[in-house]
Every structure is written in structure tokens, then in C-alpha cells.
Image (spheres, rainbow, N blue to C red):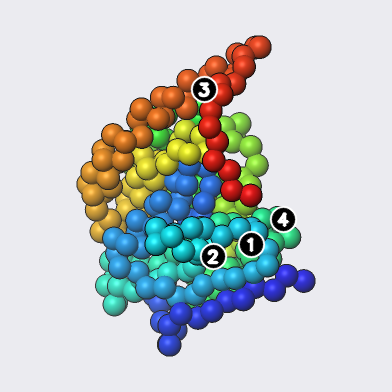
Amino acid sequence: MITWEITQEVKTLPTLTKPIFIEGLPGIANVGKIAADFMIEELNAVKLYSFFSYKFPHSVFVGDNNLIETPKIEIWYKKFNGNSKKRDFLILTGDIQPIDEEGCYSFCDEILTIAKKFNCSEIITTGGIGLQSVPEKPRIFCTSNNAALFKQYTKKGMNVEKDIFGVVGPIVGVSGVLLGLGKKRGVKGVALLAETFAHPMYLGIKGAKELLRVIEKKFSYGINLKKVSKEIIEIEKQLMKKTKEWASEMLAGSRPGAKPKNKEVSYIG
């Protein structure tokens, strides 16, 4: 049995009004994590729980202060103080995901227990759909564990693609398992998946912006999408040259008989 060490980061647990639970852990191009972290910062969310387990990856990070930091997974919350137009939310984000199937299932069980504790009526999981090139305007695809909820997110005006069958394979990790276990435990939810470039060093900020657009359209949280656009412009200036190199290497590697270019690789092991 896997034990999760869950630390409450606030003295008193908040009372939330019809909260939405949003998952944004690392995945393809980190589109979900980027979107979740932006919401936390933009809307001044408060850290509620932190998690630790021996099912975390066996590694640590080196911070910008040159000191090590252990991987983290956290839940944050935002309370809108009775504003009837805005539903409170919980956001799950972090540096990593559980490293194996048993860890993933047990973690999702813990998350669903917390979601039900706060009477969350809806879960949104996020992720990326990896493409071989950078999409100019990433599309958002949707799937769900509840047919009625699926129709809400794919109705006219939401600009969400509903024909996802055949576009993606199995949804691996917390983004998928949370919905699967949620169905068993009576928690309805959707997965919002953004098209992005399938390179491990690429940051899917455009895809993250489209995820935020759908969430803002649905719940009117007051997310400043223009601010995201400014950040996209700044970062894309830095990344575009490197991205073109990555794309060229991927295409070269896909040709029959192609030999990989000799590149210096930095590896932490």
C-alpha cells in the first residue's frame, strides 16, 4: 500500500462555493502545468496542500540559487468571497507525476477524496496532443466521463473539438486516470487537450493559452489572456530559432537511413 504524506499548508481549511477542480501537472510540452501556474499567479491563489511520496522520481532539481530542491506536487485554492458569478476553484500543479501505475492510481484516489471533501462537482484535467510541427493556432480537443458535461464543453461557441476518437490514443497519467476513477466514484469531469509540438524541450505556451481561453469562456474567472499573449511573444522570440532546429532534426531522423547529428548532450543521472 502506497502512503502519501499530505501536508495542510493553511491553519484553517476554507469553505468553498461549488468549486471546480483543475489539474495541471507536467506532460507533453507542459501545456497543462503552464496554464495552471498562470492561473495561480494571475488570480493570487493560496497554497492548500503539498504532497510527498517515495513514489516520486529519484531526482532533485538545482534551483536558481544553486541549491537543490525536491520535486513537489501541490493543491492551491481561490475563493471569490461569495461572488455569485464566479465559482471557487482548486488547482493541482507540480513538478512531476507519480512514476508508475500503482503510484498514479493511489495518488488519484487521494485527489478524488480531497475533491469530494470540498464538494467539487466537476473536475477538469489538462494535457497536450503532440504534433510533428509547431501549430500556428492550437486546437483544443475534449473528452469526458459524463455525456451531459461533454456537451457543455463542446457546444457551439466554445470552439472545442469534440471528435477526438482516432486523434489521440490512451490518455496516460493523472490526466486520464483521474477521470477514470472519478467515474467510478461519482465525480464527473472533462479532459481538455491542446495541440502542441512534441519535443521534450518545447514549452507549449500557445496551447496553454488556448486551454485558459476555454476555462475563461466557461467560468469567467477574469484571466488576462492579453498578458499570456505578451509572454508568448517574448518567449517565442527566444525559442523560435531553437524550435526550427528541433523540427529539422526530427524530420531528418524520420528519413530512412538518416543518421542523427552529433550534439553535445547534458545528462543528469
Q: Residue at x 41, y 73 (%)?
A: 47
Q: Is residue 131 left or right of residue 207?
A: right
The answer to whether marks 3 and 4 mark residues whose Cβ atoms lie closer than 8 Å is no
Q: Which mark is residue 224?
A: none
The answer to whether marks 1 and 4 mark residues whose Cβ atoms lie closer than 8 Å is no
Q: What x and y, as percent, mark residue 213?
A: 33, 47
Name the secondary structure under disc 3.
Answer: helix
Q: Amino acid at mark 1?
A: Phe
Q: Which mark is residue 101?
A: 4
Q: Which residue is mark 3?
A: 249
The answer to whether marks 2 and 4 mark residues whose Cβ atoms lie closer than 8 Å is no
In the image, residue 154 above or below residue 79: above
Q: Nearer the viewer, mark 1 or mark 4?
A: 1
In the image, residue 69 above or below residue 133: below
Q: Which residue is mark 2?
A: 70
The answer to whether marks 1 and 2 mark residues whose Cβ atoms lie closer than 8 Å is yes
Place residue 90 in its image quadrant: bottom left
Q: Quadrant of the N terminus?
A: bottom right
Callout 2: 10 Å neighbours few (<14), some, many (20+)?
Answer: some
Mark pair 1, 3: CA separation: 32 Å
Mark pair 1, 2: CA separation: 10 Å
The answer to whether marks 2 and 3 mark residues whose Cβ atoms lie closer than 8 Å is no
Name the secondary structure under disc 1.
Answer: loop
Q: Nearer the viewer, mark 3 or mark 4?
A: 3
Name the secondary structure under disc 4.
Answer: helix
